[in-house]
Image: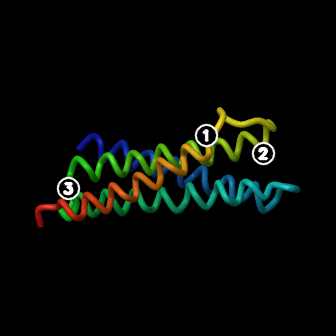
Amino acid sequence: MAAHRLLIGLAGLMGAAGVALAAASAHGADASRLATASTMLLFHATAILAVIAVLARGLLHGGIGLVAAFGLAGGAALFAGDLTLRQYAGHALFPMAAPTGGTVMIAGWLAVTLAAVMARK
């Protein structure tokens, strides 16, 4: 399915960005915000891959599971992007970008729960 491939690709990009931010936070002076952004990207990239694997087994409701996975990707991108931009450029992505990303991630996790409850298997 094309959406699954897209999500796997997004997860790969998120993982690569997470590792790069982890390296930058380990080697950069006063780059503590990058560690949080790195953790969010790495954790949610792995979660997206898990959601895709569980969707393929039919253990999640298909449509809701896809919405959840895209929510996890979008929320993590907003959150990590805002923290990274603050670190390097000194300003936010847009006002309330990180809290919006966090809210979207929470909604994504709740959608995973709903998709599990509504699964057919």
Q: Seen in the image, is 108 located left or right of residue 23? A: left
- Residue at 75% of width from left, 42% of height from top? 86
Q: Is 93 situated above or below 119?
A: above
Disc tally is: 3
Side of 119 where 97 appears, left or right: right
Describe residue 23's horizontal placement relative to residue 16 as left or right. right
SS at mark 2? Answer: helix
CA neighbours of label 1 inside 10 A, class few (<14), some (14 to 19), many (20+): some
| Residue 74 percent location from the top left of the image | 47, 43
Pointer 3: residues within 10 angstroms few (<14), some, or many (20+)? Answer: many
The residue sitting at 57% across, 42% down in the picture is 78
| Image coordinates for residue 13, horizontal then vertical, percent | 51, 47
Q: Nearer the viewer, mark 2 or mark 1?
A: 1
The residue singled out by tag 3 in the image is 61
Indicate the position of residue 96 as horizontal and vertical percent values: 63, 39
What residue did someone put label 2 on?
A: 87
Marks 1/3: CA distance? 29 Å
Q: Earlier in the sequence, mark 3 or mark 2?
A: 3
Helix or strand or loop: what does disc 3 sit on? loop
In the image, what residue type sits under mark 1?
Ala
Q: Quadrant of residue 89?
A: top right
Mark 3 to mark 2 CA distance (whole Å):
38 Å
Q: Earlier in the sequence, mark 2 or mark 1?
A: 2
Viewport quadrant of the C terminus: bottom left
> What residue is disc 1 on?
97
Residue at 72% x, 54% y: name it.
34
- Determine the residue located farthest toward the top in the rendered image: 94
